[in-house]
Amino acid sequence: MPLFEIETYSHIVITWAHDEESARETLYENYPSEEAIRITKRPRDVWVISKSVLGITGKVEACDLARECLSKAAGDKLHAIRLYMQQTGADLDASRKAIESNIVYGW
């Protein structure tokens, strides 16, 4: 099944779908108020996000505490960063990097 990239004004949604219409339906099922402004069938069945684009450099290991904060925050990055800062005493930048690097790993 092909992988589609669906761009809206607020999100970029990545989903597997049989065709473009199915991809559009998936978007509207999950984000009914969003409008698809661009739908692209990806040339491969893998999606990659460069950590350097996110500002994450060097070797960063998955962190159980950061993943726990993401889980408690239901994936809300800003809330997860606040929780991480609260629990570790880390500053904003270090907390942001810990949470974002664990989003990349998939929490």
Image (cartoon, grey):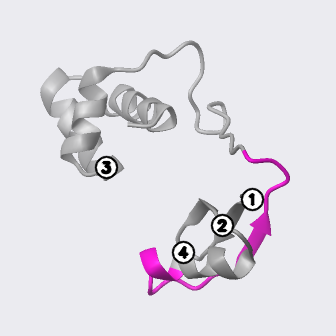
Q: Which residue is mark 2?
A: 17
In the visual, does 85 lie left or right of 14? left
Q: Amino acid at mark 2?
A: Ala
Q: Earlier in the sequence, mark 4 or mark 3?
A: 4
Q: Amino acid at mark 1?
A: Pro
In the visual, does 60 lie left or right of 87? right
Say whether residue 39 is magenta.
yes
User: Which numbered disc, 2 or 3, marks the residue closer to the eye?
Assistant: 2
Q: Quadrant of residue 69?
A: top left
User: Which numbered disc, 4 or 3, marks the residue closer to the eye?
Assistant: 4
Helix, strand or loop at label 4? It is helix
Measure the C-alpha gap from mark 2 to mark 3: 30 Å
Measure the C-alpha gap from mark 1 to mark 3: 32 Å
Q: Which residues are magenta?
A: 28-45
Q: Amino acid at mark 4?
A: Thr
Which image quarter is the N terminus in? bottom right
The residue that appears at 32% across and 34% down in the rendered structure is 92
* Labelled pair 2, 4 in contact (Cβ < 8 Å): yes
Measure the C-alpha gap from mark 2 to mark 1: 6 Å
The residue that appears at 64% across and 77% down in the rendered structure is 22
Q: Earlier in the sequence, mark 2 or mark 4?
A: 2
Task: Say few, some or many: other residues with alpha carbon within 10 Å of mark 2 (under 14 / 14 to 19 / 20 or more).
Answer: some
* Labelled pair 2, 1 in contact (Cβ < 8 Å): yes
Helix, strand or loop at label 1? It is loop
In terms of secondary structure, what is the magenta stretch mainly?
loop
Q: Which residue is mark 4?
A: 26
Task: Say few, some or many: other residues with alpha carbon within 10 Å of mark 4 (under 14 / 14 to 19 / 20 or more).
Answer: some
